[in-house]
């Protein structure tokens, strides 16, 4: 009798554990949200001139996307004036800065897009929101369309390109 009771308790424990895992899985699965349609709708309204608010979902998403790109070294915020100053430095000083001081960090990465340090972030988000090709979203994910738009509107110039 005692053995049957232990088996019954063990079976109950396994079932309750399995039930708990199923419930947690179901809750976590239903908790994932897809805001793509809301963001796309906000961008469409902004492009159509319906939503002229300073802050909307489209521009906030773009701003967050830019922050993430800069944080992960996929984009750079550059100072155009510092690149002009680096052109006037001797070749020796440029090598010293690049190899020892690493002051020209933006040259050591292959960035997807580059933003000027003095450009207003709200203006950047508005410019990208207007430039997005909404029709591309039928065949491409939002992050890819946004990345391609940022790359085309704010391309990076190599130091050697700007010296010419």
Image (cartoon, rainbow, N blue to C red):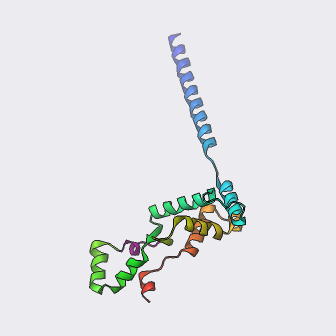
- Residue 80 position in % (x across, y down): 43, 77
Q: Which quadrant holds residue 21? A: top right
In this orientation, which residue lies closer to the viewer: 153 or 10? Answer: 153
Horizontal and vertical percent position of residue 18: 57, 31
Q: In which quadrant of the rendered view does residue 104 lie? A: bottom left
Q: Residue at 53% of width from left, 58% of height from top?
A: 64
3 is higher (above) or lower (below) than 143 = above
Q: Position of residue 129 (x, y in %)?
A: 63, 66
Task: Describe residue 80's horizontal placement relative to residue 131 as left or right.
Answer: left
- Percent coordinates x, y for residue 29 in the rendering: 61, 42
- In what quadrant of the picture does the C terminus appear? bottom left
Q: Is 65 displayed left or right of 104 in the figure?
A: right
Q: Which residues are magenta?
A: 104-111
Q: Residue at the far bottom: name it.
A: 164
Is residue 150 toward the left or the right of residue 77 in the image?
right
Query: How many numbered callouts?
Result: 0
- Residue at 35%, 81% (x, y): give it: 86
Nearer to us in this view, 85 or 133: 85
Let me know if residue 91 is in the magenta part. no
**At 52% from the left edge and 65% from the top edge, which residue is drawn?**
121
In the image, 13 versus 138, the foreground residue is 138
**In front of the other: 27 or 25:** 27
């Amino acid at each position: 009798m005692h053995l049957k009771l232990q088996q019954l308790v063990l079976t109950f424990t396994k079932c309750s554990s399995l039930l708990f895992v199923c419930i947690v899985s179901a809750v976590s699965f239903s908790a994932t949200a897809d805001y793509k349609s809301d963001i796309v709708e906000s961008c469409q309204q902004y492009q159509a001139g319906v939503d002229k608010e300073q802050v909307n979902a489209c521009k906030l998403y773009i701003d967050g996307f830019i922050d993430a790109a800069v944080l992960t070294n996929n984009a750079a915020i550059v100072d155009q004036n510092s690149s002009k100053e680096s052109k006037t430095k001797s070749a020796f000083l440029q090598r010293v800065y690049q190899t020892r001081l690493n002051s020209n960090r933006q040259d050591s990465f292959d960035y997807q897009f580059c933003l000027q340090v003095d450009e207003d972030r709200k203006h950047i988000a508005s410019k990208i929101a207007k430039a997005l090709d909404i029709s591309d979203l039928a065949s491409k994910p939002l992050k890819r369309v946004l990345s391609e738009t940022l790359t085309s509107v704010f391309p990076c110039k190599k130091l050697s390109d700007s010296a010419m």
